[in-house]
Amino acid sequence: MEHKKEFEKAVEKKVENTVKKVVKVIAMVILGLLIFLLANYLLMRLWNWLMPDLFGVGTVTYWQALGILILAKLLFGFGGGGGGKSKGGPSHKKKTRSSNKCMPWRRDFDEWKHYDQFWKEEGEEAFKAYVEKIKNENHDKAKEE
């Protein structure tokens, strides 16, 4: 009898823990969905507040804002920034490889320290000559037409 009661208590605890986990998962899914819907609403409000005045575009509905949000996520990524990854993982190697691609450009950057001196000596005159050349070419094309 005693063994049966202990077994029942153990089963009850397991069921209780399982139910708690299921409730937590459902609550997290609902919370995540609510946050997503709120973010979409905020996007719609910000768009309708700023974009028509700044750029002269029309306002959007809630569902159009959802489309914009999804498009932005597809184009710019889902924000998996990898803040908790260790430095020795594959992402670290990937960063190292991609930064090596720019090394030839970085070596040429040392030459830019002479830019100000060049602009003072030759830049303005060369620029004015270039502008005159462009104006003459445009003027010649206008005469031909």
Image (cartoon, rainbow, N blue to C red):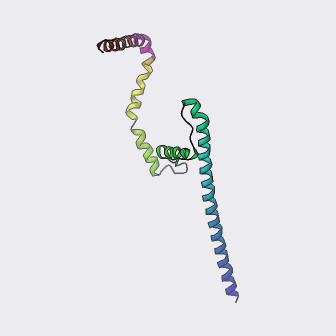
Question: What percent of the width, then of the height, locates residue 134?
Answer: 36, 14
Q: The magenta stretch spans which residues? A: 116-130
Q: Nearer the viewer, residue 122 or 74?
A: 74
Residue located farthest toward the bottom when viewing the structure as drawn: 1
Quadrant (top left/top right/bottom left/bottom right) for the C terminus: top left
Quadrant (top left/top right/bottom left/bottom right) for the N terminus: bottom right
Question: What percent of the width, then of the height, locates residue 64?
Answer: 54, 44
Residue 26 higher or lower than 4, as above or below: above
Secondary structure of the magenta portion, mostly? helix
Relative side of 30 to 96, left or right: right
**Per the image, is 110 magenta?**
no
Q: Quadrant of residue 106?
A: top left
**Per the image, is 126 magenta?**
yes
Residue shown at the point (37%, 10%) measured from the top left = 132
Q: Nearer the viewer, residue 110 or 91?
A: 91
Residue shown at the point (62%, 51%) measured from the top left = 35
Residue 108 higher or lower than 10, as above or below: above
Residue shown at the point (43%, 14%) measured from the top left = 119
Residue 84 higher or lower than 128, as above or below: below
Question: What percent of the width, then of the height, locates residue 8?
Answer: 67, 82
Question: What percent of the width, then of the height, locates residue 18?
Answer: 62, 70
Number of residue marks: 0
